Image (cartoon, rainbow, N blue to C red):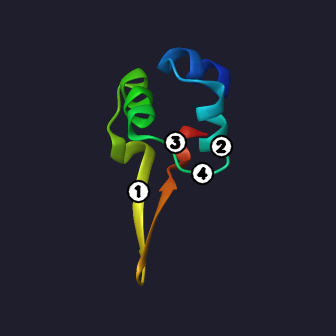
Amino acid sequence: MKKKDLRVAAGVSSASISKLAKNENANTDILVKICRSLNCDISDIMKIIEDNQQVSYKKSRATN
């Protein structure tokens, strides 16, 4: 699926898709819209990686 197709299917802005592509922070509402459009769970598109005191989020490769 191309980024444009995902943007249209999820009903999100190109700026939101751009943020995700750059591993920048995204609003949870955006992630929910993407999950609904792909008929998947949030754990299918991201996971939490703990690094000592810092918690970071990493996109799943399934979204590429």
Q: Is residue 44 or residue 25 the one in the foreground?
A: 25
Q: Residue at x 50, y 43 (%)?
A: 26
- Quick one: label 2 or label 1, which is nearer the N terminus? 2
Q: Secondary structure at mark 3?
A: helix
Task: Tell us which disc is closer to us: 1 or 4.
Answer: 4
Residue at the far left in the pictured view: 41
Give the distance between the C-alpha atoms of the residues marked 1 and 3, in whole angstroms.
Answer: 12 Å
Q: Is residue 14 left or right of residue 9?
A: right
The amino acid type of the residue labelled 1 equals Lys
Tell whether label 3 touches label 4 (CB within 8 Å): no
Up the image or down, 10 lies above or below 25; here it is above
Q: Secondary structure at mark 2?
A: helix
In the rendering, at what x and y percent does residue 15 appear?
65, 32
In the rendering, at what x and y percent does residue 39 appear?
35, 25
* Residue at numbered disc 3: 62
- Quick one: label 1 or label 4, which is nearer the N terminus? 4
| Image quadrant containing the N terminus | top right
Tell whether label 3 touches label 2 (CB within 8 Å): no
Up the image or down, 30 lies above or below 24; here it is above
* Residue at numbered disc 2: 21
